């Protein structure tokens, strides 16, 4: 089975901090995704990547950036965390029949 | 503009009865549809999918129905169990598999009461 691992389950950060969320998949998949989940808003795509060093903006990229230096690792970066970025962040790797998600990182920005 | 809509934010069902979760889509280019289940503090897990060449796909207690002319799909859970209580997300893609980005609905929270 594909395993997608997010390094932290819970994070608390201060406003203005630079935050790194790490995601690793173990099946050599080319496609990886970052979503955030908020009540009433569902899953919204932040960024995705089709290959190493490639990245594409999703629906809500503002305030975020990503890094894909190795195929198995896809990092989400909050350049200067703000309280409206408090959310559940979900990483996914593309596999048939659908995506495989990590367990999520609950980020709270205070 | 929402391309995948789940118009019911919540649904409550008695244990043993049928749960029906609905999903509508607007983009006729979508040809692959999936349902995910999500428990609190966990990532979504794949439940069942259907290709546009089919109108029904069944897996145990879960059946997904697709009505392409109405751009509507539904997930039936029979019989419903308390462990089915979760948020269910409908998702659609323009191509099956890894190259198509999934577009998700906002989710429906299902509560199955003992």
Image (spheres, rainbow, N blue to C red):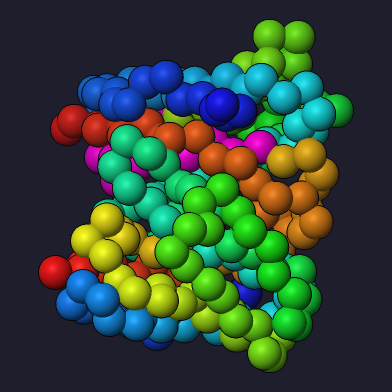
Indicate yes or no whether the magenta region holds residue B72: no
Which residue lies most toward the right here? B53
Residue B44 point in image, percent of width and height: 45, 55
Quarter holding the C terminus of chain A is bottom left
Q: Quadrant of residue A88?
A: bottom left
Which residue is pictured at 35% across the width and 81% down the height?
Answer: A19
Report the side of A60 relative to B34 (left or right): left
Residue A8 point in image, percent of width and height: 33, 82
Q: As rendered, which of B3 and A18 lies closer to the eye?
A: A18
Which residue is pictured at 56% across the width and 26% down the height?
Answer: B1
Which residue is pictured at 43% across the width and 64% down the height?
Answer: A63
Q: Is residue B98 above or below residue B51?
A: below
Which residue lies most toward the bottom here? A70
Q: Quadrant of residue A26?
A: bottom right
Which residue lies most toward the left here? A110
Q: As rendered, which of A72 and A20 lies closer to the eye?
A: A20
Query: Is residue B35 among the parts visible in the rendering?
Result: no
Residue A11 point in image, percent of width and height: 24, 77
Quarter holding the N terminus of chain A is bottom right
Q: Is residue B67 above or below residue B110?
A: above
- Give the total of numbered labels: 0
Report the side of A10 relative to A93 (left or right): left
Q: Is residue B76 above or below residue B34?
A: above
Residue B38 point in image, percent of width and height: 39, 50
Query: Is residue A80 among the parts visible in the rendering?
Result: yes
Q: Which residues are magenta?
A: B78-92
Which residue is pictured at 67% across the width and 90% down the height?
Answer: A69
């Amino acid at each position: 089975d594909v395993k997608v691992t997010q390094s932290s389950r819970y994070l608390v950060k201060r406003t203005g901090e630079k935050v790194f969320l790490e995601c690793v998949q173990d099946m050599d998949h080319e496609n990886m995704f970052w979503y955030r989940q908020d009540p009433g808003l569902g899953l919204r795509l932040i960024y995705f990547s089709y290959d190493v060093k490639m990245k594409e903006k999703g629906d809500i990229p503002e305030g975020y950036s990503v890094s894909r230096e190795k195929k198995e690792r896809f990092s989400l970066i909050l350049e200067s965390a703000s309280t409206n970025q408090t959310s559940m962040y979900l990483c996914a790797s593309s596999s048939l029949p659908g995506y495989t998600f990590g367990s999520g990182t609950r980020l709270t920005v205070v | 503009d929402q391309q995948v809509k789940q118009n019911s934010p919540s649904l409550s069902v008695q244990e043993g009865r049928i749960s029906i979760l609905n999903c509508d889509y607007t983009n006729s280019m979508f040809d692959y549809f999936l349902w995910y289940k999500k428990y609190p503090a966990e990532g979504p897990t794949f439940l069942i999918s259907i290709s546009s060449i089919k109108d029904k796909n069944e897996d145990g207690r879960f059946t997904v129905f697709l009505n392409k002319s109405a751009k509507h799909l539904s997930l039936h859970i029979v019989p419903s169990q308390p462990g089915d209580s979760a948020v269910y997300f409908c998702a659609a893609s323009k191509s099956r598999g890894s190259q198509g980005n999934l577009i998700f609905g906002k989710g429906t929270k299902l509560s199955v009461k003992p």
